[in-house]
Image (tube, rainbow, N blue to C red):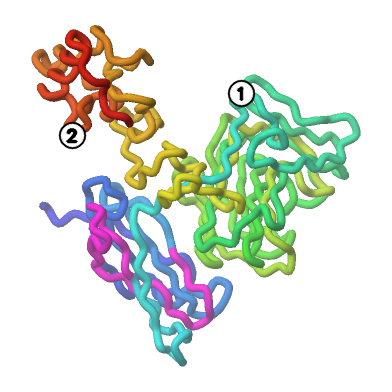
Amino acid sequence: MDGSLIYDFVGEFAGDRFGFVVSGTGDLDDDGYDDFGVWAPNYSVGGPNKGKLYLYSGFDGSLIRTFTGETDEDYFGYPSPGGDINNDGVSDLIFGATGVDIGGADAGAVYVYTFPIETCFNSIWEASSGEFPDEACPLWNLINTADIEFPTFQGDTLVLTTSANAETMYYSLSGSQVSAIDIFVIECRMRYVGGTSDSPEQSGAKVLSIISGNMNVLVVGQDEIFIWSAVSVKGASAIVDTDDDFHTYRMEYTGTAVSVYYDDSLVLSGSTFPTPNPNLIYFGDGTSVASGTSIWQYVRHNAYAFDTDVDLDGVIDSCDNCIDTPNPDQADANNDGEGDACCCVGNRGDLNGDGMDANILDLTFAVDRIFRGGGASGCPAEADVNADGNPHNVLDLTFLVDRIFRGGGPPGGC
């Protein structure tokens, strides 16, 4: 250590008092390096002294994410060292808000967030499926007022084009299709090709979200992205490449705070604004004062309202790797996307995965695995032939020999 400066950071706005408290937070992003939080108690965008917490990577100093107070005079974001609260091996985040009035004037509050924050997307549309969003499940609604244009496929991408500013072409989910959730995330991968507009704040492809009366819009224009600070009012913006290639755009709503990520880097922060309109999500050209072309690879979010859990294991079906068999741990030994709990069909013993009942080929597979260090079966349940909870052992081999050569009983059921 030579005492040289590693990082330095400055506040966003005059009077924020950025750096009033700085604290290590542990390894929030699970990359092997401890991270740290910086508090700006007097951050006042959207209201006086709301407060804001900035989380930075200890590995490279990059901004991991931010949290912003929802109410005036919250003084939100006082960080603490934290710890692994839920015992999942990753540090969690603890911070305070000394001015929160929920329990009385300046009663204060403490918030604990699990990290890393993972999102289970329960609405996923991908152009590579060959289905238009209004043919897929969940079913999006197509709004198209263009005279001659229609959505078209271009390879594994969807092209949306309007040729006149008065035209609209977008896909939406609305009303009871959209859930009110605490942390809303919508992510898309797309390329902006170009367009025109009668109004600068409308110029570009849009991703609009209204959740529980809170609204914001991400506009992807010519080498610039921005969010609205009010209806049709341009807010925070960032200069980024938008037309050179496909890029991933991700919006996160945490309360009224909005964070926008561009190819996994946080580039914009702001706030939602109130609206009387019902829940709504849309992507495309949704305004009648702009036109242009955008190309989309996928859109996914976590607020689809009609999800089920048919096996009652606590994992919703759109995220469950074994829908019909309870498996709350979602174990997937070979990472093929199919849970270990449902890769076994009928009786055990298909070690080589050829779809046939236990036979000499499975016996050969077992011998190679047990005595020669060969590869493991892709499905641990199939390899546990005698159903004692221990796959790939001599007892399983004995059971197979008895079954194949001596007419012994069949392996246990799955």
* Rendering coords of residue 345 (x, y %): 38, 26
* Rendering coords of residue 154 (x, y %): 68, 22
> From the viewer's perspective, is 241 left or right of 62?
right
> From the viewer's perspective, is 168 left or right of 357?
right
Few, some or many residues within 10 Å of mark 2 (<14, 14–19, 20+): few
Find disc 2 in the rendering and name its residue. Answer: 388
* Rendering coords of residue 351 (x, y %): 27, 18
**Circle count:** 2
Q: Which residue is found at the position 24% from the left and 24% from the top?
A: 383
Few, some or many residues within 10 Å of mark 1 (<14, 14–19, 20+): some
> From the viewer's perspective, is 407 left or right of 268?
left
Q: Quadrant of residue 264?
A: top left
Which is the main secondary structure of the residues drawn in magenta?
A: loop
Residues shaded magenta: 67-94
State the residue in front, 16 or 344.
344
Q: Quadrant of residue 331?
A: top left
* Residue 136 visible in the picture: yes
Secondary structure under tag 1 reads: loop
Secondary structure under tag 2 reads: loop
Q: Which residue is found at the position 64% from the left and 55% from the top?
A: 178
**N-terminal-most mark, 1 or 2:** 1
Q: Which residue is found at the position 55% from the left and 67% from the top?
A: 256
Instruction: Give amino acid for label 2.
Output: Asp
Which labelled disc corresponds to residue 405? none
| 56 drawn magenta | no
Above/below status of 389 relative to 401: below
Q: Quadrant of the C terminus?
A: top left
Find disc 1 in the rendering and name its residue. Answer: 156
* Residue 364 visible in the picture: no
Q: CA distance from mark 1 to mark 2?
A: 46 Å
